Amino acid sequence: MNWLWMSLYHALAMAWATFWALVLGFSISAALQVFVSKEQMSRAFGRTTIKSVALATGLGAASSSCSYAAAAAGRSALSQGAAIVPALAFMFASTNLVIELGIVLWILMGWQFVLAEFAGALVLIVLVALFVRLLLPQSVREDLRRHAEAKRGDDDCCHHHGNGHEHHHGRELAPETAAGGQWTAMANAFVMDWMMLWKEVLGGFIVAGFIATLVPSTWWKTLFLEVGPPALRLIENALVGPIIAILSFVCSVGNIPLASHLWSNGISFGGVVAFIYGDLLVVPLILIYVKYYGTRAALWIAGIFYLTMVLAGIIIDLLFNALGIVPTGPRPPSAVEHSMIHWNYTSWLDLIALGFFVAFFFLHLRGSKRA
């Protein structure tokens, strides 16, 4: 039974490494719902302009969210009146333009991958803006926003009175906020997001743990072309990279160890980059998109995400090869094959996050009893 315990251990290790980021991301999502009015969100991100996309990208990078929390924050922004492109730019930036991801990349894979990750994320955001404008039908945009606002309305139905429901929306959480209870309102939004997504998050960690334990490295290596015309190899690797990310169930910073393993076993530079971007397309997240936006809009979003990830990987590979900064020579051994639990700064961040987590649930339960 050693394989079972090792699989569960690696699942716990990945949860340990990302718990603080989950709490931070869901806290940002809750703050957007409570402290930012729909009118303010509409003014800042209500239109797709260079300024709004740049601002959303900067705020996303500052938020340092994991993929699940980024999805929740993106949906919150849409429900608050943000345009589609700035909301998506925020999601990509909050998972691909963050300091902790850059540090892990530098340690495990080198500065070239850090530069590729940041440059590619900007390319990816530009491509998303282009393809949403050119490819996404207007009817799908309307479905996306309608489902986001409807889901927000469902989340806000936290208080029951008699046979009816008291609905809240943004700053219209009047009974609580008027009494200075904005933190209670934020706690309610925080708990609602957790209650909606905890099964998908937990399932993603568990499946990733089993993959890390049971799938041999030779299996990954056979998926990627290593011989033949360079152009064919580049395209095939970039196409397969995000698919591996989708099937691996590993999100955000957690997919860097597997990226290191793939690089050691022959995947191209652009394939690694495309794989890293696939954190927003893992199976649990696609199910979350369906829950947030409906099946039709979720499939359109997933398709546009996949196309942009592949093209961004190809563009970065071509650019970095032209500049001569792609690592050459024998591939290094896999730096990290499996996640491990260590007592370090992440542990302290987890303990701080646990304090906020407990406080939010306490405020939510206290508010529910009063209601």
Image (cartoon, helix red, strand yellow):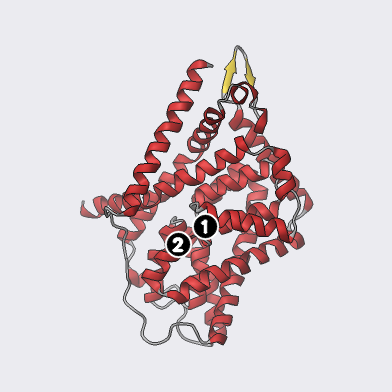
Q: Nearer the viewer, residue 206 or 194?
A: 194
Q: Residue at x 32, y 66 (%)?
A: 336
Q: Amino acid at mark 1?
A: Thr
Give the image location of residue 32, x and y in percent: 60, 41
x and y, in percent, of residue 23 in the image: 45, 43
Residue at figure coordinates x 59%, y 71% from the top left: 312
Residue position for label 2 = 101
User: Please, is residue 191 above or below residue 342 in the view?
Assistant: above
Image location of residue 295, percent across then percent down = 63, 46
Number of on-image labels:
2
Is the Cβ of the residue at disc 1 closer than 8 Å to that at disc 2? yes
Q: Which mark is residue 95?
A: 1
Rendered position, 307 above or below 325: above
Where disc 1 sits, the SS reads helix
What secondary structure is found at the residue carrying circle 2? helix
The answer to whether 354 is drawn above or below residue 93 in the figure is above
- Quadrant of res 133: bottom right
Question: Which of the two residues, 287 or 335, is positioned nearer the viewer here?
Answer: 335
